[in-house]
Amino acid sequence: MSEQEGGETPECKVEHLMGKLRRLQQGKKALEEGIEKMMSVKDVLQNELTTLQTEAYKLEGILKEKEELCRKLQFQCEDVDRYLKQNKKIEEQLDKYRCEIQELTLKHRKQRMKFENQLFQLIEQHKNLHSLYTPERLPEEIASAENTKSQLLLAEQMKLAQLHRLNEELVEMEKQISE
């Protein structure tokens, strides 16, 4: 066979195979470099993923803390609302007691004025009746007047005690509010 019949000479084949081998080696080298770059990128991405996972874990912890803080603040707001409502009720009671004290004070003042008027009238009657009654009846009239006076004084003392009791309740309520 001649060289042309086979198509190529062995030297051409070798050169052709050598060229192919060099191309394959260059391709292999390029693939290895690509793999190295991919591995490098993979390592960078893996590190970045780890960093992001760590950050996500930290953020989840912060979120849980914030949610717990939010719950605590909601409970505190509810406590403040309850306290404000209770405070409002106590203030309403205080206003009611103040009104009652004012009413009792006015009532007591009216009773005292009525008592003073009755006492003045009684004194005037006794001055006028002295001439009408005999000296024997004078001790009875004085005893009656003193009895009336002591009853009126007793009524006044009871009203003063009631007023004092209401005033003490008012002071107690004011102490509760200030606490």
Image: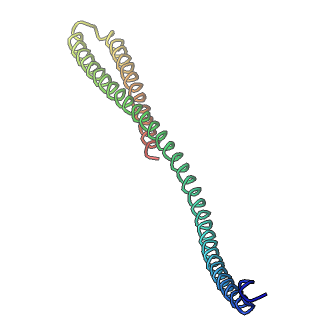
- Residue 42: x, y in percent? 64, 73
Q: Residue furthest top?
A: 132
Give the image quarter of residue 87.
Answer: top left
- Colour option used: rainbow
Residue under the image location 75 percent in, 83 percent down: 6
Q: Tell me if 157 is positioned left or right of 16 in this view.
A: left
Q: Residue furthest bottom?
A: 11
- Residue 23: x, y in percent? 65, 84
Residue under the image location 59 percent in, 56 percent down: 64
On screen, residue 73 above or below 156: below
Residue closer to the observer: 2 or 92: 2
Q: Tell me if 120 is positioned left or right of 165 in this view.
A: left
Residue closer to the observer: 149 or 144: 149
Q: How many marks?
A: 0
Q: Residue furthest right?
A: 1
Give the image quarter of residue 3.
Answer: bottom right
Give the image quarter of residue 59.
Answer: bottom right
- Residue 93: x, y in percent? 42, 31
Q: Quadrant of the N terminus?
A: bottom right
On screen, residue 29 above or below 66: below
Q: Tell me if 50 is positioned left or right of 70 in this view.
A: right
Residue under the image location 56 percent in, 60 percent down: 62
Residue closer to the observer: 75 or 132: 75
- Residue 172: x, y in percent? 46, 39
